[in-house]
Image: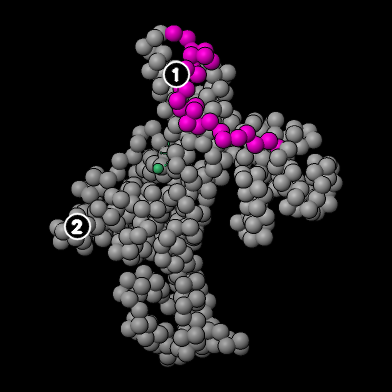
Amino acid sequence: MLECEVKNGWVQFVEFIESRCSAAEFSNWIAPIRCIEATYEEVILEVPNIFVQEYLLENFREILADFLPLKGSGEPAIRFVIANTPEKPSFKSQEAIEITPEISSVHLKLNPLYTFDHFIEGSSNQFVKSAAVGVASRPGKSYNPLFIHGGVGLGKTHLLHSIGHYALEHHKNLRVQSITTEAFINDIVDNLRAKSIDKMKKFYRNLDILLIDDIQFLQDRTNFEEEFCNTFETLLNQNKQIVIASDKPPGQLQLSERTVARMEWGLVAHMGVPDLETRVAIIKHKSELKGMNISSQIAFFIAEHIYNNVRQIEGAVNRLCAHSRLEHSNLNKEVVEKILSEMFQSNAPSKKISVETILKSVAAVFELRVADIKGESRHKEIALARQVAMYLAKEMVDESLMKIADSFGGKTHSTLLHAWKKIADQITANETLGRQVQMVRRNIES
Ligand code: ADP
Ligand code: MG
């Protein structure tokens, strides 16, 4: 009796909300919630994941208080339990099986070379790579969505496809879709024309992993953004894995607040520019794949001249490879310089930045002396300025990590990496520090 009455409160809340929100919102956020127990003290709600819980409380806290029992504080007395998700992906529905083959074969084009094995790790991409391995091994159960952002040619698409390969290899029944945002939009347009939009929706909403590349192309496509966002929410709420690649972080994309918020829910990971050592390793790896042996000296030489785009590095290796096949000649520095001269020129640094320049600029912004920053003092402010200088040196000075660390009064390469990681983490969380670092950077660049 008693339980029934309180449960009715939940049912009434649901009815009330249904008439006040869009059908998509309702089916994504409210319909998946189950009331599993209700007493006068509290109501126990089962939610598919923490996001649904947050959504409910954030948007309807006050209305919930009108329908459900209250705590002493006046808050609705709700206890949430997260539903158990089956270990194995649970797509079994006949309907899903019917619509899978034709559509998925059209889009699932994973580049066979874009696998984790062929992805070279370095400090600039270690974090994002391990996040990618995490979601590929346990789709929907670690970070969701995983949002990867970074500049052009740094390996975002490579990682996205690696996740697809890995997941398919390890869980044969998973339904994986890898698609560029352009193709997704074209899909909507084609299906609208062919009046098969419902079929398309069903297809997307029955996926286990959706890999979306180049989400920046969703900007200024308002008509499509809503469909995208609905698909996105449906998948997230069923704990299906979403991975997105973008040239900017979510907050810098011109998309609605709702879309940006969804993208920021899981893990946002930055793909940085690989440092010198990593570039050398990439050159070695790519040339081996082509059956060519490039000496370390030549690899360093190329890596010192092409530094902000792995795709260009790959282009350089391809050129050298073609050349050595035609000429049957050995590659030395002069030959390489001749073959790659245009690429080097277009990449020539405008000016070389030194550790000293960085130290001076950090000292000015933090109002300290260069000698103190370079010294051994563990005073909090000095230590922070030192770590900022190390962070910027790793980002801006094109020397090996060992050399950079040495310029800080003989520090080790792991001290440098530790400082870099610490500041990289802090500048997103600490606005003041973020602004200070930005200021130093601008001073150096101007
Ligand atoms: P993005 O999508 O970020 O523009 P891509 O994923 O298309 O870049 O990468 C461009 C090229 O560089 C690809 O051929 C890719 O294999 C290669 N590449 C980028 N980063 C790495 C890496 N860390 N290890 C090996 N290859 C890489
Ligand atoms: Mg790409």
Would residue 183 be found to the left or right of residue 440 on screen? left
The residue sitting at 52% across, 80% down in the picture is 78
Question: Residue 312, position in %: x, y?
Answer: 44, 31
Q: Residues within 10 Å of mark 2 (few under 14, many from 20)?
A: some
The quadrant the C terminus occupies is: top right
Front-lying residue, 208 or 193? 193
Q: Residue furthest front?
A: 446
Q: Residue flagged by tag 1: what amino acid is it?
A: Ile
Question: Residue 58, position in %: x, y?
Answer: 50, 76
Q: Which residue is mark 1?
A: 339
Distance of mark 2 from mark 1, alpha carbons?
A: 48 Å
Would residue 137 be found to the left or right of residue 411 on screen? left
The answer to whether residue 347 is visible is yes
Element on which disc 1 rests: helix
The quadrant the N terminus occupies is: bottom left
Image quarter for ligand 1 equals: top left
The residue sitting at 78% across, 53% down in the picture is 367
The residue range painted magenta reads 329-355
Front-lying residue, 96 or 267? 267
Q: Of marks 2 and 1, which one's residue comes earlier in the chain? A: 2
Front-lying residue, 106 or 3? 106
Residue 139 tag number? none
Q: Which residue is mark 2?
A: 191
Q: Residue flagged by tag 2: what amino acid is it?
A: Asn
Q: Quadrant of residue 6?
A: bottom left
